[in-house]
Image (spheres, rainbow, N blue to C red):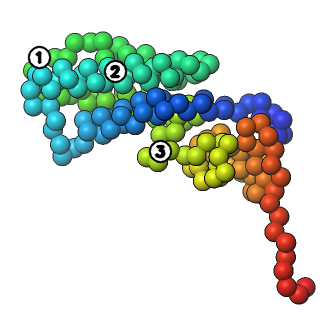
Amino acid sequence: MNLRTLTAARRAPAPRPAAARRAVVTALETCALLLAEDVSVVKSSQDVRDLRLRLRLHQKHLGSVAGSRPAQPRLSGLVETARRSAAQAPPDRLGEAQAYLRQLAEEVQAVVVEMGRCGLVCVHPRECPPAHAPDQAAARIRTVLPDIGCRLLCNGVFSFDDTGVLADGRVYPPRRTVPTGPR
């Protein structure tokens, strides 16, 4: 695989508007709250209604962000599964409703994880710097490509082993250090 093929085949991250990042962060917070083993936030039927509404809104926002990109079959399937689950009425019994909400939270969380894997959004607790930022190399590694000696970062930047960088369609040459002292 050469650099031209790699550049053409890469999935560039979508622009990360604040609304998309906010949707991811709040969805992850809600999912973490519902999936925590030691905490039961569902104590009444009103809690069930509120949390179901919140998860439905997360699913809707994430679906709109995911729908802004070309078709990703796995992501589309996860979004559709979460949409169908969110459309179902929760069970009347509290224990069954808790299980329903946990399942829905797991499905929403799976959508977020897949969006991160596809490069649509940064799912890290602290958002990775964008490709055009001076500290672009501080982004987390998404994929290691040892056969060509580079890493694909969360922000869509290719960082090569020789310190060269491919970012925003531009190639930045390696940074060479000048040896000092006697030879």
Residue 157 position (above or below residue 98): below
Foreground label between 1 and 3: 3
Seen at 76% across and 44% down, the residue is: 166
Which x, y percent locates residue 25? 40, 37
- The kind of residue on which mark 3 rests is His
- The kind of residue on which mark 1 rests is Asp
What crowding class fits label 3: few (fewer than 14 Cα within 10 Å), some (14-19), or many (20 or more)? Answer: few
Discs 2, 3 touching: Cβ within 8 Å: no
| Residue under numbered circle 1 | 92
Foreground label between 1 and 2: 2
Mark 3 element type: loop
Which x, y percent locates residue 179? 85, 76
Which x, y percent locates residue 91? 16, 17
Seen at 43% across and 16% down, the residue is: 80
| Residue under numbered circle 2 | 57
Out of 45 and 127, give the one closest to the viewer. 127
Horizontal side, residue 170 vs residue 30: left or right: right
| First along the sequence among labels 1 and 2 | 2
Discs 1, 3 touching: Cβ within 8 Å: no
Mark 1 element type: loop
Q: In the picture, residue 132 is in which quadrant? A: top right
Which x, y percent locates residue 121? 53, 34
Total count of labels: 3
Q: CA distance from mark 2 to mark 3?
A: 21 Å
Q: CA distance from mark 1 to mark 2?
A: 21 Å
Q: Is residue 56 visible?
A: yes
Out of 14 and 74, give the one closest to the viewer. 14
- The kind of residue on which mark 2 rests is Leu
| First along the sequence among labels 1 and 3 | 1
